[in-house]
Image (cartoon, helix red, strand yellow):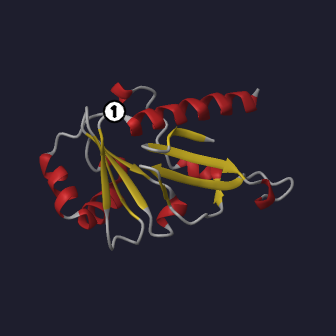
Amino acid sequence: MIIGNPDKFAIHFDEVLDWGINGASWTNGVFCFYINGKRVPEKIYNFELNTTLAGIDFSKSKISDFEAITNEKIIELANTNPKKFFIEGVLQYGNEYCKGVYPLDITELSDNGINLCLLFMGTKEVLLWTVDEYNSFENEIFLNHEITKSLINLTYFIQTHHSRSKS
């Protein structure tokens, strides 16, 4: 399933039945992000989807649930020294690092040197990511809540799918 617009920002996850073990409680599959049409990560990894999706904060059900970043020093650090921003801030403190900083904390991606973080600035969203263990960084600015809308839609899907599977 793809949630969002892959030409802008989307989350893609699907079960791969051939990767599973019959009768096992885990669900193996693919998981990635699309950022302006580019797949992140490019390589296909075998993810345990329940664990992978647990790394995303599902407490936000509307855009107003996201708090905007107000600390200008954090914004400056993310722009001027993204490695320090990730290693000394996001990785150590996660969501507690600073209001408005939302790590997309996927263990399987981090284990492969791939980390993403959303800086929510109200009308502007900045996605900052690395795919090579902090050797280089990319960022993209989104002005129409592409990221938060995708996270909200993923939350809705997970909550409705999970409640149906328990019934």
Nearer the observer, 102 or 134? 134
Q: Is residue 145 left or right of 28 when viewed as pictured?
A: left
Residue 133 spot, x, y in % from top left: 39, 72
Is any part of residue 78 visible from this angle? yes
Q: State which quarter of the image contains the C terminus.
A: top right
Residue type at mark 1: give it: Asn
Nearer the observer, 88 or 144? 144
Q: State which quarter of the image contains the N terminus.
A: top right
Q: Residue at x 29, y 36 (%)?
A: 143
Q: Which secondary structure, mark 1?
A: loop
Residue 158 spot, x, y in % from top left: 60, 35
Is any part of residue 59 visible from this angle? no
Residue under label 1 = 144
Residue 153 spot, x, y in % from top left: 52, 32
Relative to 19, say whether 153 is above or below. Answer: above
Residue 156 found in image quarter? top right
Nearer the observer, 24 or 31? 31
Residue 32 spot, x, y in % from top left: 54, 54
